[in-house]
Image: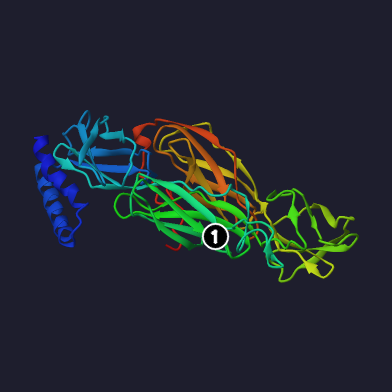
Amino acid sequence: MRSIKLVPALAAMAALFAVSAAGASAKPAKRHHIRNHAASASACRVKLTAAPRIVESGESVLIFGQLACPTGTSVANQTVTILQHSAGTAISTLGTATTDPSGRYELPSAALLTNSVFYATVQGAESSHATVKVSPKVSLVGPPDGSQLFTGAGPLLVHHGLRSANISSKVTFSGAVSPTDAGAIVVLQREDAVGGEEWHRIGLTTVASDGTYSLTHTFRVPGEANIRVVVRSFRLNGRGASESLSYEISQAQNPALTIFSSADPLSYGGSTTISGTLTSGANTTVTLMARTRTQSAYAAVATAMTNPAGEYTFANETPLQNTAYRVTGAGKASATLFEGVKYAITAAAPASADVAGAPLTFAGTVTPGHTGQVVYLQAQNASGVGFHTVELGTVSSGASYSIVHTPFTTGSKKFRIKVHGDPQNQGVASPMFTVEVTPGPLATLKPEAPSNSTGPSAGQL
């Protein structure tokens, strides 16, 4: 009897992946007819939940639910068959589970690679369908995180018609998308100056047949630059975002009066030495000028005398936020040097052991803290390389944050907290911490809260 029931059920699930508009309009009515027929054959009802509803490629989900039957019909020790349809593959049986005395059941899925739909059949009853969105793994390779980059044609300006170095400021960003989705759109994005998860497009390409992509970009605007890529899949996956990389974009150097920093970026509270050379400027007074994003003009912060070789030094400069510096002297002005200052964060790991389906709380502080600032809870990828965002939180008025997240699959989970950079300070991530998630009683499993899986915003695609 069970094998007979599977035939219309499989057809109903296939309807979810129909391509034509006509098919999409006709199939739902057929599914409704199937369920009415199943209801007439059995008064039992079965519920199914798949959690979490958003995962990254390579992660698994937990399928669970409960069988309910009229009084006198046993719900214990019943075999529940769970079916799966993943985009790009045929419908298949995920497996079977046996109900406990109260009719509850659970079954972990295998690693998911593409968007998937699940449903269950038991005692002639058919559950509703549960959809899981699977984001692709997206890697981003560029200059090392925290690097200083330059605007325009390169780090050195043309001086008297000649360039002092043949170095281009064009930056290449590349990476890979898994599973391979040739033709999917790859959008290179830079976070807007206002910050707060507002991203705009600065480059566009597509995924190649081997799953790779590459874009070249020349920065035009100095300052803090947070860069990421977002992949928009058309067939297999939901949208996927890479980790962000933070850079300080400075103007090209003026060879007549150079400016350098001994440490860029700085950790919050750290200091740096700013130095350079004034050409033909022995024993000349130079002035260090500074401006933060809240200041409309540069202000003098220190003066120094060059040595016989025209070299100058400003030691122990301790900016507490991203600061633009320039040096003037002998009628000349250096380029703008952008000094990045990283946020300081604390992150307290939750209990070392947890039960699947029970919420975990991740808490800490951000310095300097800004009310409403976004904080990211990230999980290490299943491959052990890189991280992806699983939850967003915000900083409260006391510079603290608290993020609640419920894991549903068991095993060793590795997390970290990350704060993206913004015009005031540069991003930073906490050390990684591990949480052991163990199986819990079936009775404690509840459907996932709508706020439990929160990905980063897509921004301007």
Residue at 40% over, 54% down: 231
x, y percent for residue 167: 62, 56
Residue at 80% over, 57% down: 277
Q: Is residue 361 above or below residue 218?
A: above
Q: Residue furthest top?
A: 77
x, y percent for residue 371: 61, 58
Quarter of the view holding residue 50: top left
Instruction: Decide if residue 243 is in sight here.
Output: yes
Residue at 35% over, 39% down: 61
Instruction: Decide if residue 396 is in sight here.
Output: no
x, y percent for residue 422: 60, 58
Q: Please state the total of marks drawn on the protein image.
A: 1
In the picture, the quarter occupied by the C terminus is: bottom left
* Colour mode of the rendering: rainbow
Residue in front for this viewpoint, 301 or 158: 158
Q: Is residue 295 left or right of residue 140?
A: right
Q: Is residue 202 left or right of residue 283?
A: left
Quarter of the view holding residue 302: bottom right
**Could you tell me the amino acid type at mark 1?**
Gly
Q: Is residue 430 above or below residue 22?
A: above
In the picture, the quarter occupied by the N terminus is: top left
Q: Which residue in the protein does label 1 denote?
A: 196
x, y percent for residue 84: 24, 41
Residue in front for this viewpoint, 281 or 121: 281
Tell me if mark 1 has few (under 14), some (14-19) or many (20+) residues whose alpha carbon lies within 10 angstroms of its own: some
Q: Is residue 60 left or right of residue 145?
A: left
Label 1, secondary structure: give it. loop
